[in-house]
Image (cartoon, rainbow, N blue to C red):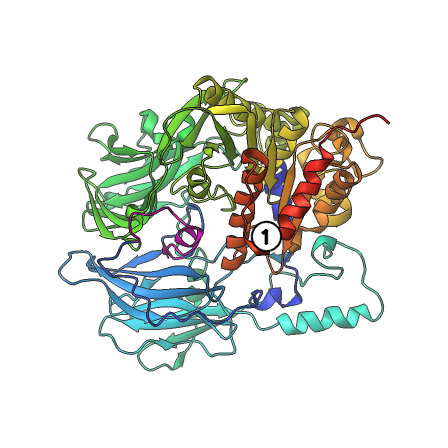
Amino acid sequence: MVSAVAFNRLRRAALATAAFGLFITAASARADCDSWDPVASAGSYGARPITSRNLIELVNFGRPDVEPLGGPSAFGVSPDGRWIATVLQRADLATNGFCQALVVIDRRHRLPPRVLDRGGDFLLATYSDDGHYDSNGVPRLNAARFSGDGRAIAYLKRVDGKTRLWVADLDARRPAAVSPPTRNVTKWSWRAGPPVLVYAYDEDGAKAAAAIEAEGRSGWHFDRRVAPMLGLRPQIPAPLPETVEAVDVESGASVPVAPADRASLHGDGDIPLGQHRQGAGGRVAWAERLRNYAFSPLRIEMRGEAGLAIPCAAAACTGRIAGLWWVDAGRTLVFLKLEGWNERFTSLYRWTPGHGQPRRLLQTDDVIEGCSPTAGDLVCTRQGATQPPRLVAIDTRAGRQRILLDPNPGFGALVLGGVERLEWRNNVGRQVYGDLVLPPDYKGGRLATIVVLYRSRGFLRGGTGNDYPIQLLANRGFAVLSIGRPALFAVGDPAVNDDDSFWRANTRDWADRRSVDSAIQSGLDLLVAKGIADPSRLALTGLSDGASSVRFALIASKRYAAAAISTCCVDESSDDVVGPGWVTESAKLGYPPAAPVDDKFWRPYSLALNASEIRTPLLMQLADSELLSSLHAYTALEAAGQPVDLYFYPNEFHFKWQPTHRQAVYDRNVDWFSFWLQHREDPAPDKAGQYSHWRMLRDRLVPRRSP
């Protein structure tokens, strides 16, 4: 993660259109969503093996096809606590598009869920970093929010290339767009009081693009605006000035923008844990970092009416706090915390200051996130290893749960591999856990085993980045070990005082990479000792930090029979292809200058410098926006005659977003590991060329005979 986190921060949006509503259009048709009923109470896939379509077209809350990310809630709760509104989304493989539906749920279960609106294309999340617009391919969270009077619901919908603000209401009047069709809405919020929507948009992107074109007539200066791997031109500067509008929802008329409106647009409905939360009797609560770096543990702090501290001495109040809310009219705090072995558990606590210490209401390996308190419940999404996300209400007094909406009601009928969570330590004593998934019909014996990296939380789709379909691989007869990486090496280091020193401590002598590599090897040793893993058929996969772990492992050990990565590579060539911004960032991480190349520093991590020694068959499936950073390593491996293959996908980012690309990635990864570890080939005619090439790569591994 040392390199992957910072490297991803330097990625730039490749097109000049990025600044005014970045959206890369795939070659796809609009999905036909009119017949989609996302709130059907019945429905089943039947008792049959899971397919790639079952995984790709799963319905999710607020954004499709992502692992748990935290952040703002994906749903809104009406002021009276009865109604919950959310935007359900799913991919549509037939059109390489997406469907979304605005749904309202009765928390009291007196009325069935209702669909208020359908339609809308994929929403790509963008952000401003280091003076440029950027995206990593993660879909934008499309949260639904109620007006102050509880009658109207606002949400986003992207149609014909523009992201507009829409409004529906509980009286089932026809949903309508609030913002004009020429504007891309970047932020929005409800104003307190009568129903007025405030939104922001930027309209100077075209001017900025034109200015860059004009500058090109006399030559572009090579500076921090340039990221060669994403295009040989300066990127549009960010942030662009935003225009703020306010609209009366009843009349549709523009109203003057109030001074508080601009402040209301920041935060996207998410209250940072460090922000003070006002309770009853003047009490204030928040969570504060113990040390001044991003991965520091947090501690819950509280002050009473007179400003005096109300300490919490319990261990529960310190650690990985994930959510914090006042309930019971502001008299009691409830909070979510990740805890236990390598923070494997999500726990919910209840604490009434002055009445003892926090009491744990529940503890689970499931992921609970995106919560909102209402009328004695905490309304959240919850997902488990074999359970896609559901909307639940958790009683904040007893921890009991009610299911409010399961948008994938038939998923449980599919034949899945069993999941067992294992615990172990690496060679420096760090706690590690992994989810072992075995074939549904497993009766014992050693299996080819595939490691999926680098987080293992919530529903087991395909690891971080969702490129390695765990259940599809298990159904193909593999054992799969989905590993949650150990804590970063520098966590808890008393010498670390800020983010820069934190990352340098992780980089020094590749300490964090060595820690993760030991976690992987120890986990595989555990499976070999259990008689499950075949030590001659072990494989690795990963994206981002996971891909970094794979590359390090292939250099450190010869035990792997195959590997696949989704991103590549941070190495001695990165300054050349990522651009001037990376030069600054890499120095902060403790990396040496680009020239002269420090072979000793890079030797444990660079595929290119070790190309003659790496004999493990390696498949790269990359985004086109990251291809250039991989070519130094790929070319070196190819020149050394090693079994390496590379595919790249158009209009993609760090995380791939297009459904048809997801299916191609899934299928090719399954084929790759079946070929190398099980000696199996899919006889489909359209795959003949793929296997012909792979057989040629396999021939490279045959030792050359002396004449």
Displayed quadrant of residue 416: top left
**For mark 1, what is the residue?**
687
Local crowd size for mark 1, using a 10 Å CA cut-off: few (<14), some (14–19), many (≥20): few
Viewer-nearest residue: 627 or 545: 627
Residue type pointed to by label 1: Lys
Let me know if residue 82 is in the magenta part: no
Horizontal relation, residue 383 to residue 480: left or right = left
Viewer-nearest residue: 538 or 434: 538
Q: Position of residue 622 (x, y in %)?
A: 62, 49
The reply to whether residue 707 is visible in this rendering is yes
Horizontal relation, residue 605 to residue 109: left or right = right
Viewer-nearest residue: 295 or 512: 512
In this rendering, the answer to whether 586 lies above or below 24 is above
Q: Residue at x 21, y 38 (%)?
A: 399
Q: Position of residue 295 (x, y in %)?
A: 50, 35
Q: Quadrant of the C terminus?
A: top right
Displayed quadrant of residue 428: top right
Displayed quadrant of residue 350: top left
The reply to whether residue 11 is visible in this rendering is no
Residue range in magenta is 45-62
Q: Position of residue 26 (x, y in %)?
A: 56, 66
Q: Quadrant of the N terminus?
A: top right
Q: Residue at x 80, y 40 (%)?
A: 639
In this rendering, the answer to whether 429 lies above or below 345 is above
Let me know if residue 61 is in the magenta part: yes
